[in-house]
Image (cartoon, helix red, strand yellow):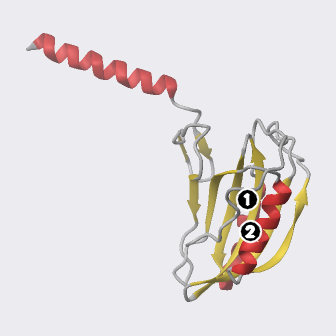
Amino acid sequence: MRSLILSLSLVALFGLGASVVSAPPSLKFPTMGFSIAPLAADPDATEYIPLQMTLPADEDGFAPTVNVLVQPLEGTIEQYKELSIRLLKDSGFTVIAEGFTANTVGGTDDAKALVMEYEGEVGEYTFHYYAKARQRRGNIVLATATASAASWKTHALALKTCVDSLSVDGAKKPIATAPIASPVKPATP
C-alpha cells in the first residue's frame, strides 16, 4: 500500500513538473494584480479566439470587450481589407474609418496593420467596433474592441489603447495574391 501511494505521488509530481516546465510565459496583468499562463494552441490552428477580455457591464447591460481572433488568410492584407469592408457594408454596418499603419512598435512584425472603426446593429442593439488586423504566417491576427454605441465615448480610449497594442511576431509578407478565405465578420456580443 505504501509503495502504491509513493508511486502515485511520484507520478503526480512528475506530471506537475512536466506541465510547469512546458507552460508558456505568463500573461501579466499588473494593474489587476495577477498573472496567468495562456492556453497554447497549435500555431497552425485556424479560426479561433485565443484571448477575450471584458470590462464591467455598463448601465445598458453590455460589457465592453476586446477579442483577439486568428483567421486563415490567403492573399494580401489589402484584399482582406476590401472583402471586410464589403462584408460590413452588406451587413448594414457603417464604416467610420479605415486605413493602414506601418509597424512602429514591438515584436518582429514587419507588416503594416489594417485599422478599422465601424458601427452597426446586432439584434436590437447598436454597437461600436474598433479593429486592428496584422498578417502573420498565412493568418490574420485581429483584435476587436466592442462597446454599445451609447457607451463608446466612455470606453473608447481604453479600448483603442488595448487594440492598438496588438503586435505579432514572425510576420512575413505574403508571396501569393490568392483570394481571401475569411474576411472580418461583425462580432456577436
Q: Is residue 99 above or below residue 24?
A: below
Identity of the residue drawn at 85% across and 73% down: 97
Disc 1 marks a residue whose amino acid type is Val
Disc ID at residue 28: none
Of residues 58 and 132, the one drawn nearer to the viewer in this rendering = 132
Residue 8 location, quadrant: top left
Badge 2 element: strand
**Residue 85 seen in the figure:** yes
Residue 7 vs residue 95: left or right?
A: left
Identity of the residue drawn at 21% across and 14% down: 7
Label 1: few (<14), some (14–19) or many (≥20) C-alpha neighbours in 10 Å: many
Residue 33 at x, y percent in the picture: 56, 48
Identity of the residue drawn at 61% across and 39% down: 44
Q: Which residue is mark 1?
A: 163
Residue 118 location, quadrant: bottom right
Q: Is residue 136 above or below residue 6?
A: below
Disc 2 marks a residue whose amino acid type is Tyr
Q: Residue furthest front?
A: 178
Q: Quadrant of the C terminus?
A: bottom right
Contact flag, marks 2 and 1 (Cβ < 8 Å) = yes
Of residues 80 and 126, the one drawn nearer to the viewer in this rendering = 80
Disc ID at residue 130: 2
Q: Is residue 57 above or below residue 179?
A: below
Of residues 121 and 39, the one drawn nearer to the viewer in this rendering = 121
Residue 156 location, quadrant: bottom right
Label 2: few (<14), some (14–19) or many (≥20) C-alpha neighbours in 10 Å: many
Identity of the residue drawn at 14% across and 15% down: 4
Cα distance in 3D space between marks 2 and 1: 8 Å
Residue 158 at x, y percent in the picture: 72, 65
Q: Earlier in the sequence, mark 2 or mark 1?
A: 2
